[in-house]
Image: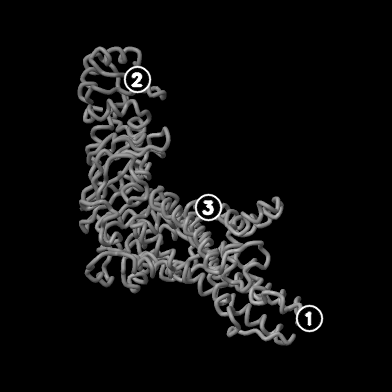
Amino acid sequence: MSTITDNTPAGVFAGLTPLPPASGKAGFGGALRSEWTKIRSVRSTLWTLAAAIIISVGISTLGNWGQSSDTAAQLAQRDLVARSMFGIILGQLVMVVFGALAVTAEYSTGMIRTSLSAQPRRTSVFFAKLVIVTVVAFVVGEIISFASFLIGVHFWTAKGVALSLGTHGALQAVFGGGLYLDGAALLAFGIGAALRNTPGTITIGVALLFVVNIMTSFMPDSWQSDIDKWLPYNAGSQVWATQHTADVGTAFGAWAGFAVYIGYAVIALLAGLWVFKRRDA
Amino acid sequence: MIEAVGLTKRYGDKLAVDQLSFSVKPGQVTGFLGPNGAGKSTTMRMILGLDAPTSGTVTVGGQPFGQAAYPMREVGALLDAKAVHGGRSAYNHLLCLAQTNNLPKSRVDEVLGLVGLGAVAKKRSKGFSLGMGQRLGIAAALLGDPKVLMFDEPVNGLDPEGILWIRNLMKALAAEGRTVFVSSHLMSEMEATADHLIVIGRGKLVADCSVQEFIDNNSELSIRVRTPQLEEFGPLLSARGGTVRADGEGALLVTKLGMAEIGDLAFENRIRVHELSPIQASLEQAFMELTKDSVEYHAAVPAGQGV
């Protein structure tokens, strides 16, 4: 490095290709490319996504294998499509970690100050991040739901239960499994932008998707039936179910439930956007 | 060109920056001097729009930084060398910044070479030494060939070689007609680098002048007088209008009298003088004196030249 000391005074950018003249404005396109680079260039994101796939598909497979000791008649009573994607229940928690880290890691490392010094238009930065997180979580979510289902089908076929993506409602539910996981990442992303803190975001995300369901099970039955269907997990999971009254007394339909679920994510995202734009970085 | 007008930032009850107005001109290194906690970093964050001013405005090249068409071509800033994701390689760190401003990929490699990090481009910045981290931050600042450069305490913790490199770099950038604004809490560092000084204390402007003016105004010349006839000569000097104090090592420190006056006075009174030497108060002392208490700033600014 000692060579630099000697050559700087002779024109700082001597020997470098001059930058091309600029026209227009730095905007959303550049922000999008930047966020894509950010997300693919840290191991923590890649590890988190790999963990989401391994945990979800692994748990689904274990669950499906366990149920294959049941008789064909017993199996036919169940929502086998939803059961085949059982691992989503844990996978959603890993997606929370992914969605949270996509924004909170910028604050914990201090990178946000560097990012916003390069592109101070915060709305562009926020939505670029949001689009990248949405697309990446969507792809990973669909990999999880399709892999879980297709592996599950093998167990049922062995038992003589005919099930495929062509079965009525199956394709929509399997596609919905991926959407549900995407929603978990978005919920966490919104909370993360509002809180700017990784442990806090993950705690709240996990609480909303997981812990509240346990808490309401201790409530009186009359309350439960009113509240249950509005819980994020219960509402959202309708989109990857084919029987909509399975565990829950009254339940939303697939898309109504998903709309409620995404509604929570939208509230979190709006809060996140507001804080992202207004608060000092 | 950076222009701040009545810039104020309040955190709760604490006024971090108080009605700060100044302009930073191109073609010279402007030092931003003040003790730790004086509000230098807060001011720099407001210039970049990271923190919103409570009141007042600041513009870069005549507009708020956030409105620049290509922000990185306008301002290159190194506020905190640790403000990077340590898990990302130096190359990818710079790439993700370059992409926001549509800068070509080739620029990343070139700038990495410029700061001497070409060999570690693919290494994660987590493992970088302080000096390497500083160079990475400077590489980021240089990516957009910016008109304005801002560095917050750039030499903190660097080895002498790194300090020299940054000093030369800042001077070279200014010589190219760029605006260079660099903060420090060390007067000695500013003496070596800056042409112009903006001095703040407790968020308020204390001085805005050239380094030479600052030296002339703030470092009083005193004269050390060593004589075996201290008791006789002291009162004579006072009577002639000098301010006299003992330096604690058996000599007198005299101000407000010239060397010739003191010598003549000694001759007239048959005082034996063993030493008569001019002492320039260190700038570091002058600076500390100037910024030690905010109450003094009110007096110091209007009286400015006479301090």
**CA neighbours of label 1 inside 10 A, class few (<14), some (14 to 19), many (20+):** few
Residue A197 got which mark?
3
Q: Is residue B199 above or below residue B118?
A: above
Q: Is residue B256 left or right of residue A178?
A: left
**CA neighbours of label 2 inside 10 A, class few (<14), some (14 to 19), many (20+):** some
Residue B40 got which mark?
none
What chain is tagged by disc 2? B
Q: Is residue A13 left or right of residue A149?
A: left
Rendering coords of residue A205 (x, y %):
57, 57
Q: Amino acid at mark 1?
A: Thr
**CA neighbours of label 3 inside 10 A, class few (<14), some (14 to 19), many (20+):** some
Rendering coords of residue A55 (x, y %):
65, 71
Q: Amino acid at mark 3?
A: Asn
Q: Are marks 1 and 2 on the same chain?
A: no
Task: Single out the mark in the foreground, 2 or 3.
Answer: 3
Residue B245 got which mark?
2
**Residues tagged 1 and 2 counted as in contact (Cβ below 8 A):** no
Q: Secondary structure at mark 3?
A: loop
Q: Secondary structure at mark 1?
A: loop
Task: Single out the mark in the foreground, 1 or 2.
Answer: 1
Residue for point 53% across, 65% down: A258
Q: Which residue is mark 1?
A: A71
Rendering coords of residue B279 (x, y %):
30, 31
Q: CA distance from mark 1 to mark 3?
A: 48 Å
Q: Are marks 1 and 3 on the same chain?
A: yes
Q: Is residue A95 left or right of residue B99?
A: right
Q: Nearer the viewer, residue A257 or A49?
A: A257
Marked residue nearer the N-terminal end (1 or 3): 1
